[in-house]
Image (tube, rainbow, N blue to C red):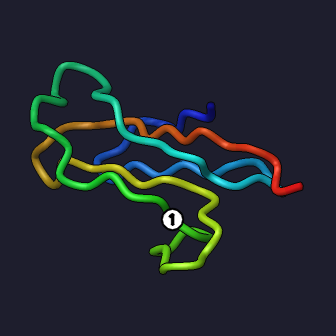
Amino acid sequence: MVVGPPAVFAFVSCPSGQVALGGGGLPSGTGAHNPLTTSIPTTNGGGSNTGDLANGWFATAGIGGGNYQAYVICAPTT
């Protein structure tokens, strides 16, 4: 599992050559009080489409939701 740094719009990537199996977001600090509004896989830092091999994760509670940390569970592609 890879955990990204705290941010309002949290993003984390798998190591090179790995794909995302799942992920999510965790509150980071006392200001993170809102539920997550977005928790989605990403491909090369952008949105993932059907058929894409996701290699990261994005999570946020939106502006005013405090900082969160995205996490992603990765596995080798081969």
Q: Does residue 1 lie above or below 53 as drawn?
A: above
SS class, disc 1: strand
Image position of 25 (left or right of 17): left
Image position of 7 (left or right of 31): right
Q: Nearer the viewer, residue 49 or 57?
A: 49
Of all residues, the one furthest to the right in this rendering is: 78
The x, y position of residue 8, in whole percent, is 28, 47
Residue at x 51%, y 45% (from the top left corner)? 22
Q: Nearer the viewer, residue 28 or 18?
A: 18
Residue at x 19%, y 37% (from the top left corner)? 66
Q: Nearer the viewer, residue 27 or 56?
A: 56
When asked about the image quadrant of residue 30, the answer is top left
Residue at x 51%, y 65% (from the top left corner)? 42
When asked about the image quadrant of residue 16, the answer is bottom right
The x, y position of residue 11, in whole percent, is 47, 52
Find disc 1 in the rendering and name its residue.
42
The x, y position of residue 52, in whole percent, is 60, 76
Residue at x 61%, y 52% (from the top left corner)? 20
Tag 1: amino acid: Thr
Q: Does residue 67 lie above or below 19 as drawn?
A: above
The x, y position of residue 12, in whole percent, is 55, 48
